Image: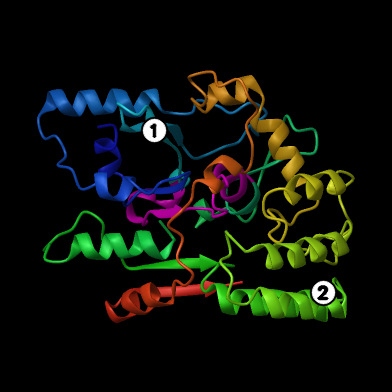
Amino acid sequence: MAWTWLERRVQALVGFITLFLSFIVTATTNTAHNHQHQHHHHKQQESDRIIKLPGQPAKVSFSQYSGYVTVDKRAGRALFYWLIELPANGKPTSKPLVLWLNGGPGCSSVAYGASEEVGPFRVRPDGKTLALSPYAWNKGHYIPELSQVIVHHNKGIKDPIINFKGFLLGNPLIDDYYDNIGTFEFWWNHGLISDSTYEALNESCPYESFLYPRNQCYEALTRAYSQFGDINPYAIYDGPCSETGTLLHNLKTSLPWTFRGNDKCIVRYTKMYMNLKDVQRALHANVTQIPHPWMTCSDVIRGSWTDSPKSMLPIIKELIAAGIRIWIFR
């Protein structure tokens, strides 16, 4: 299992990992203690090392690793990860691991978390080169269900491998009812939707599932979406990207009421960069040569997501009672 070398680095690395649900559980496997196994795991580690990303700035003082971990060989199922260390002068061996997961469901943590939010780089407008981000988290399962799994597995263990202390929820979906009410209120108060659309949303959608609204609610959401025009509800005071209309059109068939990005054209830049063949080779990605383009979000994954609860509040309450610290920010 490729994770054994990662176990020894849990206190040293900051990670941005896509679809990482199985990692925390498998990370409880025993670390090999003899030299032969240590040598084997060191080779695995080095094979995942990113030597240099295409277009990367010259002065990069931190190490990166990426690749796949097989979780179901018979089904051909694997998870992609991207780990970023702190710079050497930041004493990475004394710092905790931060695990970042993006939602959707079906959206990429590489696309959003690593490339557009808290990662070390930003893709430049040419879609080919990178710039260092001044807000990268490496300078200095966030999801409730994953936190719950860790707490449950740590019960009765004197020295658990994962010394779990807390988690952060950024702009999260917590409860369908309260999230819907707040979202509709925001749209209406900021003049994004009409009075009649606001009334229709409140009548047909408050108790609906976020992922699977019934027809009447879906029609009201579609009407609201059409009234946004080129405005991005996540950044209503920004001017639209020249490709905003195309972006919103593409979202209409999947989740018209959730918009996946808030920095004008950054989604376009990231798509361009991540679809470059030399970038995929440097990241040890798409090793099976899947022919279709890489996407920031997958409707295939979203459409297969059948176990999303309507409320996370019971899990959050359980974690608070267990002494876990939680920070929710918007």
Query: Label 2: which residue?
Result: 197
Left or right of residue 226, residue 279 in this image: left
Element under disc 2 = helix
* Magenta run includes residue 95: yes
What residue span does the magenta drawing correspond to? 89-115
Q: CA separation, marks 2 and 1?
A: 43 Å
Q: In front here: 62 or 287? A: 287
On the image, the x and y values in percent for residue 188 come to 81, 78
Q: Which label's residue is closer to the chain start, 2 or 1?
A: 1
Residue plotted at (58% across, 59% down) = 212
Left or right of residue 244, residue 55 in this image: left
Q: Is residue 298 visible?
A: no
Left or right of residue 304, residue 9 in this image: left
* Magenta run includes residue 51: no
Residue plotted at (30% across, 26% down) = 74
Give above or below for 123 relative to 240: above
* Quarter of the picture holding the N terminus: top left
Which quadrant of the figure has residue 319? bottom left
Query: Label 1: which residue?
Result: 78
Element under disc 1 = strand
Give above or below for 20 relative to 312: above
On the image, the x and y values in percent for residue 260 come to 68, 53
The kind of residue tagged 1 is Ala
Residue plotted at (63% across, 64% down) = 214
Give above or below for 87 relative to 172: above
Q: Is residue 28 visible?
A: yes
Nearer the observer: mark 2 or 1; the answer is 2
Q: Say few, some or many: other residues with alpha carbon within 10 Å of mark 2 (under 14 / 14 to 19 / 20 or more).
A: many
